[in-house]
Amino acid sequence: MGGTWFLGKRIAEDALARGWEVATFNRGLSGRDVPGVETFRGDRTNITDLNRLAAQGPWDAAIDTSSSDLAPRDVLAAATALRPVVHRWVHISTVSVYQGWPHLSLTDDSPLLECPPDADESYGYTGADGSPTQYGFQKAGGERAVTEVFGDAAVFLRPGVILGPGEYVGRLPWWLERAKRGGRILAPAPAEQRIQPVDVRDVARFALTQATGSARGGFNVTHPDGISFRDFLEACLTETGGAGAPVWVDPSVLVEQGVKQWTELPLWRTHAGVWAVDSSRAVAAGLECRTIAETVRDTWRWWAADGRPVDHPRWAEHGIAPETEAKILASL
Ligand SMILES: NC(=O)c1ccc[n+]([C@@H]2O[C@H](COP(=O)([O-])OP(=O)(O)OC[C@H]3O[C@@H](n4cnc5c(N)ncnc54)[C@H](OP(=O)(O)O)[C@@H]3O)[C@@H](O)[C@H]2O)c1
């Protein structure tokens, strides 16, 4: 479900490389078909398209990467239409489904936000400090919808932040560009704060592991070791050859200066639990994560070879304007 964009594309490529037979279902609006897949076009919010897709089955597994903007009731409709022809469902969810994210340390068993499985797109809300999010409610309802239909034949992967070649959100590409520009770089203290982004290729591999497995329930998919913000920025500087010097600024100053968390300085957020997501269950079940320095290197190679702003509405949200950054640095 999906298969042409960021994570879905990697899953399709990896599955083909293993010699699997792969079909992708999407509207034909984002990205390109991966050569070698069987393609089905349709809108998954349209029941006629879903029934047409179901008539092409059966499949050993479905991997759902295309429900990021879908209401639970649409996830429910897709799962229901495909249940007779799909043996197992791997659902790509998010850590945003947890009541405690980003405030508390989390395990896979932490309580989820409450959302009915047949809720429409208006269900939920986003809190004043950006938590919880309506997205989190909707994804939690999507999980419930899949559970209702697939029961123990469903598994839920809950990544935090996914980075890597092809990233469309603009988080790592922005830091790479910023490092390349050099100079004094506004950086969020403490420099030793560990962050846990996970590489898109590792999420894809784990999704395929789960497609053939028999596990049930949820898996947090976050980097088990993480990397300090200092080492992350050092890796960006090394790869890009930038001669920049991070200036580590206390979070209270950044907040006071109105720096938007999560977007203006991507990957930075003050909440205590944002990078305290335990993925040991996934690691025990086969999640293997390359080092984040490798993700930085390969993303820079992709970006340097192919780099142009990705045509996605979220791209423009990311990164602080050079004049705002300079003003804050000058005020210190
Ligand atoms: N990126 C992150 O940091 C992050 C973090 C946590 C969780 N996640 C989750 O990871 C999953 C994968 O994200 P992604 O970035 O790889 O892909 P995505 O942007 O969520 O999905 C894109 C894919 O879905 C297809 N699609 C979208 N709407 C569709 C519709 N109505 N009918 C049929 N196909 C549709 C798109 O093709 P067409 O447009 O051509 O139809 C495309 O192939 C999502 O569920 C997201 O919530 C992402």
Image: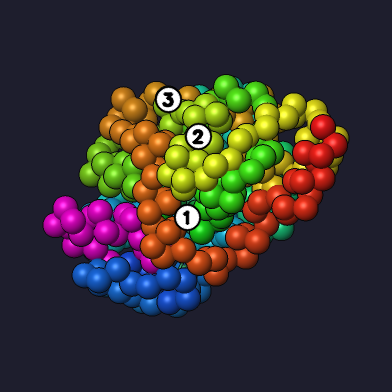
Does the stretch in magenta take in 95?
no
- Along the line of sight, the residue nearer the viewer: 68 or 272: 272
Ligand 1 has an atom within 8 Å of the beta carbon of the residue at disc 1: yes
Quadrant in which the N terminus is drawn = bottom left
Q: Which residue is mark 3?
A: 225
From the viewer's side, name the closer residue of 158 and 179. Answer: 179
First in residue order: circle 2 vs circle 3: 3
Q: Is residue 299 left or right of residue 246?
A: left
**Residue at x-position 79% and y-position 49%:** 324
Tell whether label 3 touches label 2 (CB within 8 Å).
no
On the image, numbered disc 1 is attached to which residue? 167
Which amino acid does the dot numbered 3 rest on? Answer: Asp
Q: Is residue 96 left or right of residue 12?
A: right
Residue in the image at 61% along x and 31% along y: 274
Q: Which residue is mark 2?
A: 234
Amino acid type assigned to the residue bearing label 2 in the image: Glu
Q: Which residue sits at x=25%, y=71%?
A: 35
Q: Tell me the magenta residue range.
A: 1-23
Q: Is residue 181 visible?
A: yes
* Up-down relation of residue 103 to residue 301 (above or below): above
Q: Nearer the viewer, residue 289 or 72?
A: 289
Residue 138: x %, y % from top left: 61, 50
